Image (cartoon, grey):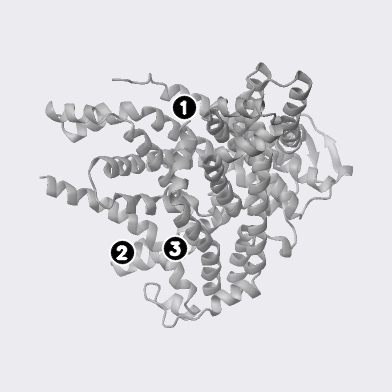
Amino acid sequence: MTFSSKSKYLFLAFCLLPTFLLFLIFTVYPMLGGLYYSFFDWSGTSANKTFVGLDNYIRLWNDSIIVKAIINDFFFVFVKVIGIMTLALFFAVALTQLKIKEAPFYRIVFFFPNIMSVVVIGILWQFIYDPNMGIVNSLLNQVGLTEWARPWLGDKTWVLPSIAIPAIWAGIGLFMLLIMGGISNVPKSLYEAADIDGASEWQQFWHITVPLVWPQIKTSILYIIITSLNGSFVLVQVMTGGGPGSASEVMGSYLYQRAFEDFQFGYGAAIGVLILVVSLITVLVSQFILKKEKVEY
Amino acid sequence: MKVVSQILVRIPLILWAFIVIFPLIWMFMGAFKSNAEIFTSPWSMPTEFSFTNFERAWNDYNIGRAFLNSFFVTVLGSFLTLLLSIPTAYALERVRSKFGEVLINVYLASMMIPSVLGWIPLFFLLMKFNLLDNLWALSLVYAISHVPFTIFILVGFIGNIPKELEEAAVVDGMSPYGILFKIVTPLIKSGIITVTILNAISYWNEFFMALILLQTESKNTLGVAMNLLKIDAQYDSAWGVLFAGLCIAVIPVIVFYSIFQRHIVKGMTEGAIK
């Protein structure tokens, strides 16, 4: 830019400052505040705020529901990574490589749940699982598997997988598109050469597609991990509220209940810090595991 | 052999398409059914197409009000996001400096931090400013939460504009403000459309911040109102109304999706890859 330096700095300030100030107030301050509040015992009114040091964290350590919630969170991470990646990879390869005429139809349909609200998805699936009017039990009864029918979301063993299914249902489209984008960048000549060499489609998948699309696969896995740890509680809170008992509790839903239902804001803030720490560690570890040099042929 | 594999590969595709579509069809059918029909014949078509359930959801269960509130928050939030992001994205892309690098990394890093962490302080911050239960404040909170993502996308689009255009405008005596709003902004129109579609969808669908930051029924947005409708439906056994409510929440998204399908697909893949 060739303006005088004073007007240049004025312009830069005009561009950057208002946004950054609001960002400080509404994003940075709340995050630091979360850390700060986690050292207090606080019911929400300013009179009842006492500094308790690490007490909230000691309580976290001894809280059996927290252990349960962390395990459940990782159950969702694990099942979602496996379920979404398997299906998304398969669909992406099928829709790009196998010359299917109606591929755009599938692409549009598979992506649709991605743009639905989690509340709508949660409520819809809650009724799909409903013991009386739901379609799951009704289907099982019709095909004669009556003994399989059960109150899916009220059953301690089945509640977690039952919530994981809509999470996968709603998640596949985005990652399928991501991987399709990666596959379309793989030079066609590689597959032609492999065909001439007599490589089977399965071999082509493992030796050409997977290595060349690895950056997209890696991004997808990390993205699933982050969004699951930071956001899967919305579906849990809508579908079961963490129940039955605390069978489907995850860290985020537990935070919401402690803070905004029981008004233990200090303890809630400590759970927030725990979510941050757990997700950062998980992302770092998975980044290390998924590390693999980018392949270029 | 080829024919067999063509058929085999379609089985999972058709099956999954069915698994995606059927729950939605079931939801639409349920919206037209009476309670008795819902319980006795979950698979059948409704006997008559009456819009009673839709009317009751819209009028008696606050979905109409919530629909308008969601619309307000979505439009205002999307507009504020652009207002806050375009100047920053321009300055960060065009004036490369140490400070700019730090700033862009601060914005990017904030996308990695779970927003749950900030909800408790955010709640008390808005309470202090007397902004709880305020749709303007909710729109602003939404906008700021998406500023980093929006900047991230727009910087890429601004980077593709040839610098010569701006240099020519400077020669013509245009101020930097004029260049930003009259030259750069129109040139990144497709980026603005893409990112706004993505932002608008997530504002329309947002639930938890609205649940925490809104308090009276007349202020509720669709997510919160649907959650309340679900609880009320259990007391009133108003199942058809509940399904109608779900349809009201989903229909705008379906319409929006069919219009902007191409942009959404492009935005999702391009935005996420980089």
Q: Is residue B141 visible?
A: yes
In the image, taking residue A73 as reference, residue B126 lies left or right, namely right
The residue singled out by tag 2 in the image is A145
Q: Position of residue B229 (x, y in %)?
A: 61, 67
* A125 sits to left or right of B57: left
The kind of residue on which mark 3 rests is Ile
The crowding category of the residue bearing disc 2, from other C-alpha atoms within 10 Å (few below 14, some 14 to 19, many at least 20), is few
State whether discs 1 and 2 lie on one chain. Answer: yes
Question: Mark 2, chain letter?
Answer: A
Mark-to-mark CA distance, 3 and 1? 34 Å
Q: CA distance from mark 1 to mark 2?
A: 40 Å
Q: Residue at x 43, y 48 (%)?
A: B262
Q: Quick one: label 3 or label 1, which is nearer the N terminus?
A: 3
Inspect the image, locate mark 2, and give the three-letter code of the amino acid beneath it.
Leu
User: Is residue A7 shown above or below A172?
Assistant: above
Q: What separation in Å lies between label 3 and label 2 (alpha carbons)?
A: 17 Å
Within the image, what quadrant is residue A147 found in?
Answer: bottom left
Please report contact status of discs 3 and 2: CB closer than 8 Å, yes or no. no
On screen, residue B131 above or below B118: below
Mark 3 or 2, nearer chain start: 3
Quadrant for the N terminus of chain B, please.
Answer: top left
**Residue that mark 3 sits on:** A128
Residue tagged by mark 1? A286
Q: Residue B236 appears at what percent x and percent y?
A: 60, 75
Chain letter of mark 1 equals A
Q: Secondary structure at mark 3?
A: helix
